[in-house]
Amino acid sequence: MLFPIRCFSCGAPIGHLWDRYREGVNSGRKPGEVLDELGVKRYCCRRMFLTHVEYIDELLEFYQQRVQQLRKAGEG
Ligand SMILES: [Zn+2]
């Protein structure tokens, strides 16, 4: 859902690096290169970036639909 603030294994703070990682990868660079540049060296921290799936935007769509349904039901 949201990118974790800390690595699950070692507890290192990594949340502040997510935006820069995503920008680097979206611009076509290799994820490993971007992580090296950001100074993420431990493999436990690297897997946090490599395996993260961001789906908060898709989830919010359902939430907004549900809110609209509840508002319509309240009006009727
Ligand atoms: Zn770690």
Image (tube, rainbow, N blue to C red):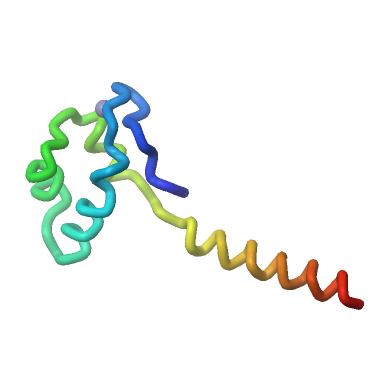
Check the image and name the residue furthest to the top. Answer: 10
- Looking at the image, residue 68 lies above or below residue 8: below
Check the image and name the residue furthest to the right. Answer: 76
Specify whether 1 is left or right of 26.
right
Q: Which of the 4 image quarters holds residue 39?
A: top left
Q: Residue at x 43, y 48 (%)?
A: 2
Find ligand 1 in the image and state its quadrant: top left
Q: Residue at x 27, y 43 (%)?
A: 16
x, y (%) of residue 65? 67, 70
x, y (%) of residue 61? 57, 67
Q: How many marks?
A: 0
- Looking at the image, residue 55 lies above or below residue 47: below
Q: Which of the 4 image quarters holds residue 13?
A: top left
x, y (%) of residue 25? 19, 58
Q: Residue at x 32, y 24 (%)?
A: 11
| Quadrant housing the C terminus | bottom right
